[in-house]
Image: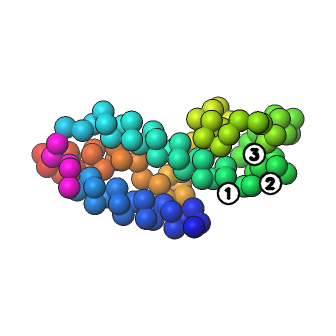
Amino acid sequence: MSLTERLERLNQVCRGWMNNYHLTNIYAKVKKLDEWLRNRLRYCIWHDMKKLERKRKNLIRLGIEDGQAYAWSRTRMGGWAVAQSPILKITITTSRLKRKGYRPLLDYINNTQTSIW
């Protein structure tokens, strides 16, 4: 599944879930879930790159220097560890995910609170 399809489905599920539970006090739990979702999206992006050279080229496109991109692309960490490490947190930021179509769960909470009052 492509990243755009994944983000569309994720936004649909999150919108429905937040509409169902928007009156409860779940801010802390939503914040943790939102962090996990961003890590999962970073993992999916890293996993989709597959080959080492493609990872290196994509890291360079994301603004990492050549030598650092070479070292990070050949890391021996697993995909989930890389998603939680500075390798992807620096390059695949929340603002980049938002530009691709990701909508953080906290946005749903903030929008429902302003519309209720």
Q: Residue furthest left?
A: 117
Q: CA distance from mark 3 to mark 2?
A: 12 Å
Q: Identify the mark at residue 79; answer none if there is no mark.
A: none
Residue 100 in percent (x, y) is at 54, 58
36, 107: nearer the viewer? 36
Q: Is residue 94 above or below residue 71?
A: below
Q: Quadrant of residue 19?
A: bottom left
Say which residue label 1 marks: 48
Identify the residue shown where x is 19% and y is 37%: 25
Q: Mark 1 falls on what kind of element?
A: helix
Residue 59: assigned label: 3
The vertical placement of 69 against 21, above or below, is above
Frontmost of labels 3 and 1 is: 1
Q: What is the distance, in whole Å, between disc 1 and disc 2 at their CAs?
A: 9 Å
Task: Classify mark 1: residues with Cα within 10 Å, few (<14), some (14-19) or many (20+).
Answer: some
Report the disc number at residue 51: 2
State left or right for residue 100 relative to residue 70: left
Occupied quadrant, residue 66: top right
Q: Position of residue 37 (x, y in %)?
A: 46, 46
Say which element carries label 3.
helix
Tell me the magenta residue range: 20-24
Amino acid type, label 1: Asp
Residue drawn at 53 percent across, 55 percent down: 99
In the rendered view, does 43 fall on the left or right side of 30? right
